[in-house]
Amino acid sequence: MSPRPIAVLASGAVALLILTGCGGSDSENQDSASAPTSESPSAEATENMNSDTNVKALPLGDGKVSKKPKRGYVMSCNDTFNGEGSQTDGPWISDDTWNMDKKPAVKGDVKWPNAKLTIKTKGEKRVISGNGLPDQPTGKFPVQESDPSYQYDRNPNSIEKQSVDWKLTAQPTEAKDPTCLPMNTIGISLDGAAIFNALDAMGRDAGAHEVLDECWGHPEKNGSYHHHTNPSCLDDGSGDEHSPLLGYVLDGYGIYGLRGDDGEQMSNDTLDKCHGHKHEVDWDGSQQDIYHYHMTYEYPYTVGCFTGDPLQIADPGQAGGGEGDGPPPQ
Ligand SMILES: [Zn+2]
Ligand SMILES: [Zn+2]
């Protein structure tokens, strides 16, 4: 049984949503746990579509938390992080880099047939409602003892329905100044999952430290399934064109995939302090010169700060300031 497709409705035209499978849960990653730790970063580009970013040696984002907008940083509303440790450092982390190809994925092929997400514009609002469940298979959470990931990240949380009922502005504008990102939900991915900022409960680089499933998602303590990084099971289009829209951020702006015009892979160097830029892009069914964010392989992965005024939402995790991923392995 495949997951039920999610309806994405926009006025005038429809945001293109191509649903793709996530591949099997038995990936080559399963042996990563015993991978050597001292492999030196390769200077060669990797073979997949990562012609620019060397995903075998991504700079670790730990400590790149700021109170002001700063390129390559998360401008965080939190300056203390009281969350519990999620894991011990895996062998894919060495010194100041981490190797995406060596990081294991949480196993499983759990389907969510009741996943629901609708997005439509009504006047000046973009109305987003859903239940937070992804329309793609996830790993099995809590992480099972038999899962090789368990030795690094014993995520004890289960994926639970959420209540998403947002009215974002459909015509976002830049605020006078960028603003900080709360912990937990900062947007929604078109697969139905929440987008969180790049930090884990301890204020570290979540993409590097936390063990995620094949679609690069996992649940926090309230059961919210979320991405800290690129939602890797969404179709990012073809390699020589601008990526499609992959989600919406709470300030109303869109977030697109890894590539800008002509397929150029985006990086902190090509984006502004908030992790976005402005140029003509497909938006609500027509080409518009509008600001938007991009996913990147490098930290902070999604959004660095809000460029527009964010919608204030009731997210229980935002007050708690932590994901509660459970105690570290003894
Ligand atoms: Zn997380
Ligand atoms: Zn762009």
Image (cartoon, helix red, strand yellow):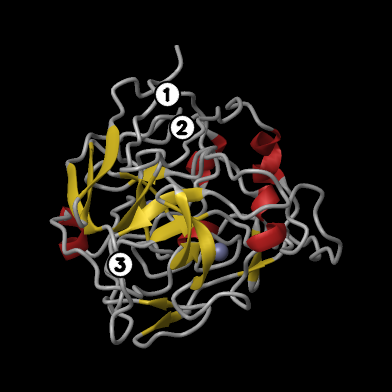
Q: Which residue is mark 2?
A: 139
Q: Which residue is mark 1?
A: 110
Residue 218, horizontal then vertical, whole percent: 40, 43
What residue appears at the point 46 percent right and 52 percent down from the top-left corner? Answer: 286
Whether the residues at callouts 2 and 1 have beta carbons within 8 Å, the answer is yes
Q: Looking at the image, is 295 positioned above or below residue 234?
A: below
**Which quadrant of the structure image shows residue 110?**
top left
What residue appears at the point 40 percent right and 55 percent down from the top-left corner? Answer: 86
The response on whether ligand 2 sits within 8 Å of label 3 is no
SS at badge 3: loop
**Which quadrant of the structure image shows residue 250?**
bottom left
- Cα gap from disc 3 to disc 2, whole angstroms: 35 Å
SS at badge 1: loop
What residue appears at the point 55 percent right and 44 percent down from the top-left corner? Answer: 232
Side of 73 relative to 258 (left or right): left
Side of 113 relative to 23 (left or right): left
Residue 246, horizontal then vertical, whole percent: 46, 48
Neighbourhood count class around disc 3 (C-alpha, 10 Å): few under 14, some 14–19, many 20 upward: many
SS at badge 2: loop
Q: Looking at the image, is 164 positioned above or below residue 161?
A: below
Neighbourhood count class around disc 2 (C-alpha, 10 Å): few under 14, some 14–19, many 20 upward: many
**Which quadrant of the structure image shows residue 31?**
top right
Relative depth, front residue between 27 and 187: 187
Amino acid type assigned to the residue bearing label 1 in the image:
Val
- Cα gap from disc 3 to disc 1, whole angstroms: 36 Å
Residue 107, horizontal then vertical, whole percent: 52, 31
Q: Which residue is mark 3?
A: 172
